[in-house]
Amino acid sequence: IAEYLQKEESVPGEDFLETLRDDFSGEFEFLADKPPALSLEGYLFPDTYEVSFSAGTRDIVKEMLSNFGRKFTQDLKEETLRQKKTVFEVITMASLIEKEVRNLEDKKIVSGILWKRIRVSMPLQVDATVAYITGRKTTKISTEETKIDSPYNTYKYPGLPLGPIANPGLESIKAALYPESSEYWYYLSTPEGETIFSKILEEHNI
């Protein structure tokens, strides 16, 4: 987003990234459970925006956060509370789903798999978290990369990563909140976008 704004000569990219470190929790209650040390990544709702050339970085960020507030409806807030989760946890999970799978049905199944792994203290082993650390845009993760010591590395540390790794759309947010139960424990996304699900590791490895 920062690169795009810079390219369009809207605002300097560095200024935009700097603004993402500001505290907006007093203006947006859904940020109340976001750790203060983390940026606003995850809450910048992906959408089409009309931005005036006179708009400053804070104006742009506030518009994206306002949009998130509209999309994350009262029903979604109530469901989050009912599940005894935080908005931050839901958005972090949704960001993993956003980067891992493409269509809604697959997203709901993957959501079910990932929440199930958390319940049994099984590492999530989400390739997208490793790609987030390295900055490499690839689905091919090396064994060496899975050993990187980072709180975002879901191969090394169980549970959710430190925070969101992307800004999830509404489908991914809903998938995170309404997972689909299945017998599957493993999944693999092909370069073409198909998701292959497996019940056991042996089947998954094949």
Image (cartoon, rainbow, N blue to C red):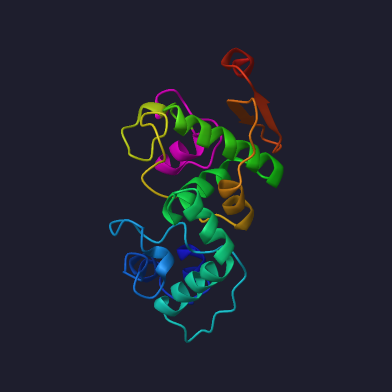
Judge whether residue 135 is colored magenta.
yes
Q: Range of the magenta residues?
A: 126-145
Question: Which residue lies at the image location 52% right of the left edge and 44% below the top edge?
Answer: 96
Residue furthest to the left:
37
- The image shows residue 148, relative to residue 136, as above or below, that is above
- Of residues 71 and 20, the one nearer the viewer is 71
**Furthest residue toward bottom:** 54
Side (left or right) of 149 relative to 47: left
Q: Residue at x 46, y 26 (%)?
A: 142
Q: Nearer the viewer, residue 138 or 60?
A: 60
Residue appearing at x 41%, y 28% in the figure: 121
Residue 140 found in image quarter: top right
Picture coordinates of residue 158 (x, y %)?
A: 38, 31
In the image as oriented, which residue stretches furthest toward the front?
A: 82
- In the rendering, at what x and y percent does residue 106 appear? 68, 39
Q: Residue at x 68, y 28 (%)?
A: 196
